[in-house]
Structure formats: structure tokens, C-alpha cells
Amino acid sequence: MQFTLSEIAASLGAEVLGNGDIVLVGAAEPVDAGPDQLALAMDPKYADGIAKGRARAALLWDGADWQSLGLDGAICLNRGKAAMPLLTRALDPGLGIPEGIHPTAVVDESAQIGPGARIGPLAVIGANVRIGARATIAPHASVGYGTVIGDDLVLHPGARIAHLCTIGNRYIGQSNSVVGGDGFSYVTLDKESAVESLRGGMAEGEKAAAAVVGSHHWARVHSLGGVEIGDDVELGASSTIDRGTIRATRIGRGTKIDCQVQVGHNADVGEDVMMCGNVGVSGSARIGNRVVLGGKVGVSDNIFIGDDVIAGGGTNIYTNVPAGRAVLGSPAVKIETEMAIRRELRRLPRLAETLRELQKTVSKLVDKN
């Protein structure tokens, strides 16, 4: 793929400075940029890198003296980071799948595929599936029977969407992601499980039993609900969204989910939520809009997280969190409280040494008496 500097400027809604006819094939950091690459130097601290590289054109900070940097052309933006989605989309070469259905793909005759589809080798589309226009389905990806998906679907190699799911427009499933696998749901038939008994007792303030006796058999609860996903949702590589037990698991519009994330059955996730790597959301949890869960955050089942909550990395959320709160730690507390706790923890070795010295002093006083 080739672009002129003027074409890139037009896609960003910006003015091109200097020679707009420079032909570019990609973007690079300033030091690594060649003469046919756009150097990304959106902060003055990257100016030295341009001199060390071979770029002829660059994306620069607002007001930059591009000519003094030895460039033939430039685009200057007030907030360069905000241009990255548009710029990277324009330069993205895609998955390299030609338009049409590959001869080795298996598409059920009852499936309805919209115009402009690109379906790669060994992809599988089940019965009564409906997919909108301009879908890109990479090799070994699959869509189960009865699933309905909107326009501009992108499934990377090995991505899975199970049966009877509903997904909006512009869904992206990265490699080996799974939508609609069965939920992890089991009960004991012979008696109340030890887990249920312990949990119920703790909720009522009772002490845990000295010995816990488990049950002998776990009976599988089948997952009859599907998954409902809104527009503009992305699911990272090796991440999973389990189908609901009776009602659907729901993911709201604009939510972005990183790699190796687990969303349990019956969870209800709001709009524009961001979940970073290794987040685990337990079954039946409810998460509001615009929530950000940092890496390795754990969310217990059947709790509610309000709108605009931010949970720092490694936080374990065991109870409801009100809207607009920033939390951190295990168990989750207000972020300022957790930072105070950590400050005090750092003082513990010194306090312990002071305590030992006091014990020695007291012991000597006792011995004298």
C-alpha cells in the first residue's frame, strides 16, 4: 500500500506542509524511519531522532519548525495522539484476504453473507447465520449456527463465535478469541456443596467450620442463553465471553477487551468499558459504563460496579463499588487509602525493630525488679 503525504493529511483533516507528493508506505519511529516512511514525532523530545533517521516527512507537534529538522514535508497537529486511530487505520494493510469465499471454506447453504465478504481458507460458517456487509473472516475462524452479526465484521485466524449469539457492527475478534462458550456452572445433587455452605455462613457472620467436607458429584448446568454484543466491540486474543445460563451475557457498545480476559456467564457489561490483560469477571457481575479495569483485576460474582469506576492493576473487587470511584488493592479500597496502607507497610520492618528493642528494654527492667 502506498500513500502520499497529502492523502494522509486529508485523512486526518489537517494541512500538509511542504511537499505533499512524497510517497509513503508506512510509519516508523523517528530514528528508524526511512525515506518512504512517515516519522512519528509528536513531541519535541523526539526531534533528535529525526536527525538520526532518514525520514523525508513526519507527523509533528503543533508549531514545529519542520524545515529546520531537514524534512521535505510535514503534518503538524495540536494533539498528535488523537490522530493515531485515523493514521493507523489508513496505513493498516489488513489481513491480506482477497474478496470472495475461499474454496476450502465451509459455508452452510442457509447462511446469508453480505456483499464484499472476504472469507479465508478453512473458515466455517454454520446454518442460518446472518452476517452483514464487508465481513473479513480469516483462516480457521468459525461462526456457529443461528448467530447474527452486523456489518464490517473482522475475525482473525482461529477466532470463534458460537451458536445463537447476536453481535453488532464493526466487531473485531482477535486470534483464538471465543464468544459464546458454555459457562462454568455446576451444582451438587446429593447435598449443599461445601462452597455454598461456607459462603452462606460467612455472609451471615458465622465462623467457618473447623473441617470442610466436600460433595461427591458436580452436576453440569447447561448454558441455554447466548451472548449479546453491541456495536464497535473488540475482543483480544485468547479472551473468552461465556454464554448465559438462561438469559444472554451482555457486552455494551464500544467496549474494548484485551488479551486473555475471561467474562463469566450472565455478566452484564456496560458501554465503553475497557478491560486490560488478564482481567477476570465472574458470573452475574454487573459493570457500568466507562469502567476501566487494569491488568489482572478480579471481579467477584453477583456484585455491581458503577459507572466511571477505575480499578488499578491487580485489584480484587469483592463487593459493590459506587460510581466514580478509583480503587486499588486486595480487597479493593479507595486508591488513596491503598496508597496510605502501602506507605505504612513499608514502615513495618522499622517498627518491628523498634518493638524488639522495647521488648529487650522491658525485659531488663523486669529482671532488675
Image (cartoon, grey):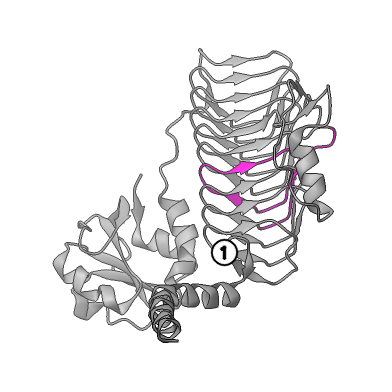
Image quadrant assignment for residue 356 = bottom left
Q: Measuring 50% from the left and 39% from the top, which residue is drawn there?
A: 237
Pick whichever, 274 or 322, lies toward us. 322
Tally the numbered discs.
1
- Name the residue that disc number 1 marks: 329
The image shows residue 268 at horizontal and vertical percentages of 76, 48
Q: Measuring 64% from the left and 52% from the top, which residue is drawn there?
A: 255
The answer to if 355 sits in the magenta stretch is no
Image quadrant assignment for residue 321 = bottom right
Q: Main secondary structure of the magenta part?
A: loop
Q: Would residue 300 be seen by someone viewing this image from the given angle? A: yes
The image shows residue 19 at horizontal and vertical percentages of 28, 68
Q: Quadrant of the N terminus?
A: top left
Q: Measuring 30% from the left and 54% from the top, which residue is drawn there?
A: 24
Q: Is residue 25 above or below residue 272?
A: above
Q: Amino acid at mark 1?
A: Gly
Q: Is residue 179 left or right of residue 18?
A: right
Residue most extreme to the left? 52
Please provide the residue range marked out in magenta: 246-272
Q: Is residue 322 left or right of residue 82?
A: right
Q: Is residue 114 above or below residue 38?
A: above
